[in-house]
Amino acid sequence: MDAPMIWVISHDPDTRRLIGLNMSKRGLRIQEISPQEELAHSGGRPHLIILDTDPPGGPGWEVAGTLRHSPSLREVPLILVLTAAPTASRLASLRPVRWVEKPLAMDTLLALVRESLARQGTERKSQTKPI
């Protein structure tokens, strides 16, 4: 079975790389995407999306809205990376499975990814490196 595909979306290339490297070292397939890229051309449907919404009110929030309005992506589990706790109305409209605040604790993010993938049954049974 192929490793689960995770999209890492952030305006910051360093954040994309940091998250991407940590996930790929654990046997996951990663596609790093900037908010300016066309999501429709990002290749395939992911099992999970990690979205960095910084800066507040920036392109990350627009991307989140686009993801939730896209017929092919609206049901894909979404983990938000935020600088501050979101409002209840924002959470209700975006329906993330979880969110995590910055500074980013990679162990926490990895645990959330593992939990989300396990809920879907997409975590590989024979991973050589545990998430």
Image (cartoon, rainbow, N blue to C red):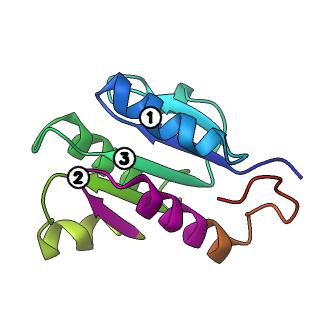
Q: Earlier in the sequence, mark 1 or mark 2?
A: 1
Q: Is residue 13 magenta?
A: no
**Would you name the residue on which mark 3 appears?**
51
User: Residue 27: where, in percent of width, then height?
Assistant: 73, 46
Query: 49 or 24, which is in the foreground?
Result: 24
Distance in Å between CA atoms under marks 1 and 3: 13 Å
Of helix, strand and loop, which one carries label 3?
Answer: strand
Residue type at the position of mark 3: Leu
Q: Earlier in the sequence, mark 1 or mark 3?
A: 1
In which image quadrant can residue 100 be found? bottom left
Q: Residues within 10 Å of mark 2 (few under 14, many from 20)?
A: few
Residue 26 versus residue 8: which sits nearer the camera?
Answer: 26
Query: Which residue is identified by label 1?
Result: 18
Percent position (x, y) of residue 48?
55, 55
Q: Which residues are magenta?
A: 98-116
Q: Are marks 3 and 2 in contact (CB under 8 Å)?
A: no
Label drawn at residue 102: 2
Disc 1 from disc 2: Cα separation: 13 Å
Q: Residue at x 55, y 42 (%)?
A: 22
How many marks on residues? 3
Name the residue: 14% across, 72% down: 89
Task: Give left or right: position of 84 versus 60.
Answer: left
